[in-house]
Image (spheres, rainbow, N blue to C red):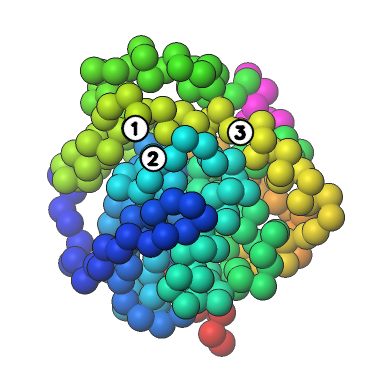
Amino acid sequence: MTRTPPQAASIDLRRIETNGIRANVAIAGSGPAVVLLHGFPHTWRLWSEIIGPLSAHYRVIAPDLRGFGASTRAPDGYDAATLAADIAGILDALGEPTAAVVAIDAGTPVAILLALLHPGRVRRMVVMEALLGTLPGAEDFLAAGPPWWFGFHSVPGLAETVLLGHEARYIEWFLTTGTRGRGVRADIHAAFIDAYTGADALRCAFSYYRALPTSAQQIAHAVAVDRLTAPTLAIGAHPVGDALERQLRPISDNLVGQVIPDCGHIIPLDRPHELLDLVLPFLAADTR
């Protein structure tokens, strides 16, 4: 299947100092701020299909997360709380006191902790295709154990050594599997592979997995003392389905769950139109 680019948004790429790093941030449009948080193996270009429609109504802020893309390849700080502080610093630098947050995969725990630790900053939240540490609700999904790559990525120094020189084949597997075989646009495909080529790029990517136990503790501590008060939309696809919604249900005051049928893990590239059909009305309710 050939994917063609949507009408391009006018995107301003900025380098923003935040929390000891310099973040590469794509900015488009004007209006209420909407922050987009990608996962693995992505960069801000994960959102290429939806930045245009969103920027017609909002100021879209799409950073490369710490260590990814053109952001600083920091030696540490890949736990969700530090990453949430990175995002808060970006909002400060851009003069945005609040934002709606849309997140997927590794960006989802970051969004959740941003909302829990800085509740006045998150107006609304859309979270997709991720699990939240050890919170109950994902037992069915994890019945056979976590996905195989979690363990592979978690061993310090292993994956980046084994994969060096084979990055393209490895990333291709995630892009193909994450779209149920449909693939992604050639330009985005090339950008993702470039972003994850080299030992240091791989080391940063796998640092997210190595920080998962710390992130899980941070989430558990946060939900023990606070609830998610921001209206939240949890969107699932294949393979996570409604597991994230089930984890969020006991800790959320205002939660809606949706599962997009025949959709791979990389929702913003596999089913962007269906995603926009859910996200745009949800965000618009913020201004009613």
User: Which residue range is magenta in the image?
Assistant: 138-144
| Mark 1 in CB contact with mark 2 (< 8 angstroms) | yes
Quadrant housing the C terminus: bottom right
Q: Earlier in the sequence, mark 1 or mark 2?
A: 2
Mark number displayed over residue 150? none
Residue found 78% across the figure and 60% down from its top: 227
Q: Quadrant of residue 53?
A: bottom left
Residue 222, percent from left and from top? 76, 51
Q: CA distance from mark 3 to mark 2?
A: 18 Å
Amino acid found under the numbered disc labelled 1? Ala
- In the image, 279: left or right of 253? left
Residue marked by disc 3 = 212
Q: Is residue 248 above or below residue 133?
A: below
Residue found 42% across the figure and 60% down from its top: 17
Residue 193 in sight from this viewpoint: yes
The kind of secondary structure element at disc 1 is helix
Amino acid found under the numbered disc labelled 2? Arg
Residue marked by disc 2 = 73
- In the image, 250: left or right of 112? right
Q: CA distance from mark 3 to mark 1?
A: 18 Å
Q: Is residue 141 magenta?
A: yes
